[in-house]
Amino acid sequence: MSNLLPLLAGLPLLIFFISLFVPPKQERALTGIVTGGLGINLLLTLLMCFYADWQFLDQKLLVLYHTEHFEFSIRVLFDKFSAVFTMLGAVIILLVSVFSRYYMHRDPGFRRFFSMLLLFYSAYNLLIISGNFETLFIGWEILGITSFLLIAFYRDRYLPVRNALKVLSYYRLGDICLILAMWMSHHLWHRNISFSELGNAGEVSNLFSQHYAGAMFVAVMILISAAVKSAQFPFSTWLPRAMEGPTSSSAIFYGSLASHLGVFLLLRTYDYWSHEILIKAGVFVTGLFTVIVAGGTGRVQSTVKTQIAYSSIAQIGLIFIEISQGWHTLALVHTCGNAFLRTWQLLVSPSVLNYLIHDMFFRFKPGPRLRTATLTDRLRNALYILNLREWNLDRLHYRFLWTPFKAVGHRLNFLRGRTGFLLSGLCLLAGIWLLQSKTVLPEVVLRLSVLFYALSGALMVLYALAERESPVSVWIHAVASQLFITLSVMLNSEVPASQLIWYLSGSGVASVAGYFALRWLIVRESYVHLQRFHGHAYEYPRVAAVFLVCCLGVSGFPVSPTFVGIDLMFTHVDSGQIVLLLLLAVNFLFLELCLLRMYVRLFLGPHQKEYHEVAFRAS
């Protein structure tokens, strides 16, 4: 029976690859394959849940890389949490796929929608049955990129692609926090641990007593990752922005499954942080503030999707409170109830909205006449305006989280053109010389060199993020930043050649392919820049797909060995090297954002040519 467990993630992935070969206009054949495969998946899930009643499954499937102190393995775990979430996902994905068969009928992106839905579900199942952080992170990353693509499903419109990039920025923040949790856990245990070991009460207690700061750091990173993924305070505003995609994808992503993955992460790691009162208080306060903010904000929104989104966020805040108190059964029941309710609400919202508009038209009654406002009225009106503006969280995030980094990037204009390329080349040559002379260099010079190249890599990425003119310049500086990061890590520690190959093989091939894809586009288009959306995916869909894969390959997405290489690079940073760690985190945080921003600007959005139909700026 344990051999059937990998099929929970493998079967949807198999259906995904099959769907790619179905002709786009063969809707009946495609939906037959999808619904049939998902029906078999539901039966398999029922069988696994029945089996899990009397046995706990924890199994190592595959070892991708192994050294004395490091092992990147694919490990699966199936317990009561996995059983509830896999059953929830199997039922909802089947219902939504049947609904989408009619809802998406004759849509130009019919096959693309179902392909992304299957890829999302495969990542979801892999995340739910993961037995260690590495396996969970693979599903976490794939789920994030499918969210990005489904939000930007209507890629000829302005707001969907803009909001997709905004949501991706929050997702990437959660990704980096999870990577940092993995990094510190490796230094605490001196090996890659499984979730079963994470729940060992005696070992965890000794860990907190001997390395309190490091152990607390892991717990805080897990909490931030969970809060970002479930759109908890202060990251609540991205979930309503994600509703720009089709209603059926909004139902399954942000109403039911994806928005509850932060809940799953807290449940999975509860045994690790449950005895720390500060972390429990943090989970409780996060949920409490979310209930207050999202509950009030949802009541004053003018769109039905936004109301449902904030209502779901408020309920997840209550689930956070339940988890902090150890009420796991209640949290699981609450999760299932909230997921099914929000799915139903989103699927029927177009019909209900149509009915309410007609009812309002025929039965409208004017409100009461205004009277002199009392102090209570003024306070209520002030609270109304605050909720209507969503507590200005978007503005605060933009001003204090993203703008400072962009401001740094704007001050690096000297990196543009030949001067920047010359400086980068000289720094790379100097770094190669430092590597050759590493054994004879003074310790102070070596440490400064490590920080210099890490800082240079971070500044390269920030410049690429702020650059609005040449996409080739952005691409070259993003690739150069990875070379600087590699030099920094190699100067900091002895890196085996096999690990360098893991890291550079995927990103190197993707860098070259992405450069030629950009050159190919520039030759065929008169003027390509990053000041506006171009929408070239309309005319060059294959080039757009290749360039997207190249962007993901350079940034370390699980499509190349670079994904394992990033984890290997972080193992060469000691637990006391905080500055180096922060520089690496900044680099990997903004690398994917600047590359996918370039993809969005070049290939998505309203088409720049006048003979193509242009959608309205807002739907």
Image (cartoon, rainbow, N blue to C red):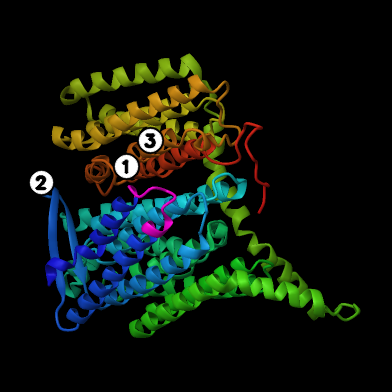
| Element marked by disc 1 | loop
187 is within the stretch colored magenta = no
Q: Which residue is mark 3?
A: 546
> Going 21% across and 75% down the picture, which residue do you hit?
48
> Going 34% across and 36% down the picture, which residue do you hit?
554
Amino acid type at mark 1? Gly
Secondary structure character of the magenta stretch overall: loop
> Going 64% across and 40% down the picture, which residue do you hit?
613
Q: Which mark is residue 556?
A: 1
Labels 1 and 2: the sequence-earlier one: 2
In the image, which is nearer the foreground, mark 1 or mark 2?
Answer: 1
The quadrant in which the C terminus is found is bottom right
Q: Is residue 231 visible?
A: no
Amino acid type at mark 2? Thr
Local crowd at mark 2 within 10 Å, few (<14), some, or many (≥20)? few
Amino acid type at mark 3? Val
In the image, which is nearer the foreground, mark 3 or mark 1?
Answer: 3
| Element marked by disc 3 | helix
23 is within the stretch colored magenta = yes
| Quarter residue 516 falls in | top left
Query: Gap in Å between the C-alphas at discs 3 and 1?
Result: 15 Å
Labels 3 and 1: the sequence-earlier one: 3
Query: From what the image shows, is residue 228 above or below residue 612?
Result: below
Labels 2 and 3: the sequence-earlier one: 2
| Element marked by disc 2 | loop
Q: Are marks 2 and 3 in contact (CB under 8 Å)?
A: no
